[in-house]
Amino acid sequence: MKQCSRCKRIFQARPKYFYRDYSKRDGLRHLCKGCDHKQRRVNSQRQKENLWMTHKIREKMGRVIMLVANVWCAGMTDDSKFVVKIDKQGSHEFIIEGKMKGEE
């Protein structure tokens, strides 16, 4: 007999109720098949959300960098620099340091 660590139900320690995991002493995972399926579904959804957020952040970062590059080319001196900071939620701030061409 084996107890699922999530739902605490007791099943026979057989592959009918638990997925195989040969790294474990009894050769079975610690979650029953039902709980394991739920956990994989949650993880899959979380990965999709993270991928979507990563895509949105990259898209926003591309727009910010293009904006800064346009400003840079429009009139910044060669010794000017800019910094782009983007956090995981996609909010950003950019800092342009330096002088415009023609300024002393």
Image (spheres, grey):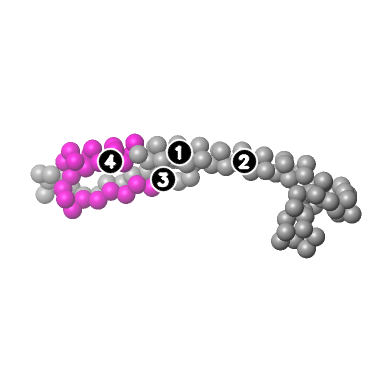
In space, the residues marked 3 and 1 are separated at their CA atoms by 13 Å
Q: Position of residue 87 (x, y in %)?
A: 45, 46
For disc 2, the neighbor class at 10 Å (few under 14, some 14 to 19, many from 20) is few
Residue wearing tag 2:
44
- Give yes or no for contact between labels 4 and 1 (Cβ–Cβ under 8 Å): no
Relative placement, left or right, of 42 versus 98 is: right
Q: Which mark is residue 65?
A: none
Residue wearing tag 1:
55
Residue wearing tag 4:
68
- Residue type highlighted by circle 2: Ser
Number of residue marks: 4
- Earlier residue among tags 4 and 1: 1
- Taking the spot 11% from the left edge, 49% from the top edge, the residue there is 104
- Residue type highlighted by circle 1: His
Residue wearing tag 3:
86
Relative placement, left or right, of 93 versus 67 is: right
Please tell me whether mark 3 sits on a helix, a strand or a loop. strand
Q: Position of residue 89 (x, y in %)?
A: 49, 41
Magenta residues span 63-85
- Residue closest to the eye, 56 or 4: 4
- Taking the spot 72% from the left edge, 41% from the top edge, the residue there is 37
Q: Position of residue 73 (x, y in %)?
A: 19, 41
Q: Is residue 72 magenta?
A: yes
In space, the residues marked 1 and 2 are separated at their CA atoms by 17 Å
Kindly report which numbered mark, 4 or 1, lies closer to the viewer in this rendering. Answer: 1
Please tell me whether mark 1 sits on a helix, a strand or a loop. helix
